[in-house]
Image: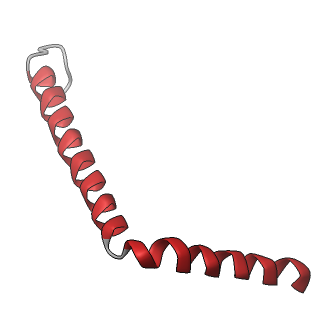
Amino acid sequence: MDWIIFPLRDFFVSLFENTLEPLGNAPNLLYLFILFGGACYWMYLQHKLNKKADQNPDQIK
C-alpha cells in the first residue's frame, strides 16, 4: 500500500510548496469574493421571487 501513498504524499507536498505557499493569501481572498458575490446574487434573486410571490393572489400563504 505504501507504493501509492508515498507518491501521492510527495505530489501533494510539492503542489502545496510550489503553488499555495507563493500565492500567500490570494486564494483565500478569491474564495471570499466569490462567496460574497454568490450571496449578493442569491439575496437579489430571493428578493425578486418574493416580490413575484406577493403579486400572485392565487398563492397559498
Q: Quadrant of residue 1?
A: bottom right
- How many numbered discs? 0
Q: Quadrant of residue 8?
A: bottom right
Residue 60, quarter of picture: top left
Residue 1 appearing in the image = no
In the depicted view, which residue is nearer to us: 7 or 47? 7
User: The C terminus is located in which quarter?
Assistant: top left
The relative height of residue 56 versus residue 13 in the rendered view (above or below) is above
**Is the residue 53 above or below the residue 47 in the image?**
above
| Residue drawn at point x = 9 percent, y = 25 percent | 51
How far from the left and from the top, in percent, is residue 11? 70, 75
43 versus 49 height, above or below: below
The residue sitting at 31% across, 59% down in the picture is: 30
Residue 19 in view in this figure:
yes
Query: Where in the figure is residue 9, as x and y percent of width and height?
Result: 71, 81
Residue drawn at point x = 54 percent, y = 80 percent: 17
14 sits left or right of 26 in the view: right
Q: How is the image coloured?
A: secondary structure
Residue shown at 23% from the left, 47% from the top: 37
Q: 58 or 42, which lies in front?
A: 42
Q: Nearer the viewer, residue 2 or 60?
A: 2
Indicate whether 57 appears above or below 32. above
